[in-house]
Image: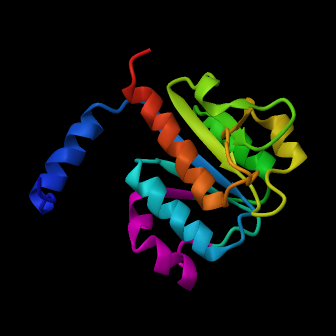
């Protein structure tokens, strides 16, 4: 076994793009850490996220520390700036997405059991406070990522990556 060269990687990824249906978007509600935002952008580009709503105090892709982590992958995404999370939920819904907030909340369902539809927008919130109650109320559903260890939550960039991957994985796995 050997690592793929550039041509081999392009071939591999092209095959997976052909097998992937469904639209995916993200809304970052007051995610303030620029390295977190950059990591989310890079993951979003890798998993063919189409739209990213930057909410409130979430830094722009051009911010130095965001750009350092994203490594130019922001060019593959379409960004929208909105003032608050409810505006992001409304905009995503108007763009045809089913909006799911990713949050540890009492009525949240595991993401792997949530209905997705043909277009899904995942909302992730502030590093410490998560999604606002207004976003939880406005979203079409609230989901969580089941954790098994003694740590009760994940870094926001890690949670966004796992949630995006799960949405894509479900499209690849026969029902």
Which quadrant of the figure contains the C terminus? Answer: top left
Residue at image position (88%, 44%) is 134
Image x and y of residue 120, in percent: 57, 34
Image x and y of residue 17, in percent: 28, 39
Residue placed farthest to the top in the image?
A: 175
> Along the horizontal axis of the image, is 10 left or right of 79?
left
Image x and y of residue 4, in percent: 14, 57
> Along the horizontal axis of the image, is 2 left or right of 174?
left
Q: Quadrant of residue 91?
A: top right
Q: Nearer the viewer, residue 128 or 34?
A: 128
Q: Is residue 63 visible?
A: no
Q: Is residue 68 magenta?
A: yes
Residue at image position (61%, 22%) is 115
Residue at image position (68%, 73%) is 33
Image x and y of residue 112, in percent: 59, 29
Q: Which residues are magenta?
A: 60-79
Residue at image position (87%, 34%) is 106
Q: Is residue 146 magenta?
A: no
Q: Quadrant of residue 109?
A: top right
Is 120 located above or below residue 13 in the figure? above
Residue placed farthest to the bottom in the image?
A: 64
Q: Nearer the viewer, residue 160 or 134?
A: 160
Q: Quadrant of residue 98?
A: top right
Task: Indicate the colouring scheme.
Answer: rainbow
Q: Is residue 62 visible?
A: yes
């Amino acid at each position: 076994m050997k690592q793929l060269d550039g041509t081999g990687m392009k071939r591999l990824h092209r095959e997976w793009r052909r097998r992937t249906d469904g639209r995916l978007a993200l809304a970052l509600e007051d995610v303030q850490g620029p390295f977190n935002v950059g990591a989310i952008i890079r993951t979003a580009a890798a998993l063919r996220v189409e739209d990213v709503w930057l909410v409130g105090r979430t830094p722009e892709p051009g911010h130095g520390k965001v750009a350092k982590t994203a490594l130019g992958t922001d060019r593959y995404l379409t960004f929208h700036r909105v003032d608050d999370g409810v505006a992001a939920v409304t905009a995503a819904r108007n763009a045809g997405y089913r909006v799911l907030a990713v949050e540890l909340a009492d009525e949240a369902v595991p993401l792997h059991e949530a209905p997705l539809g043909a277009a899904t927008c995942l909302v992730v919130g502030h590093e410490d406070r998560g999604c606002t109650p207004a976003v939880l109320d406005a979203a079409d559903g609230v989901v969580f990522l089941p954790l098994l260890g003694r740590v009760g939550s994940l870094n926001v960039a890690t949670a966004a990556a796992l949630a995006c991957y799960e949405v894509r994985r479900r499209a690849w796995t026969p029902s």
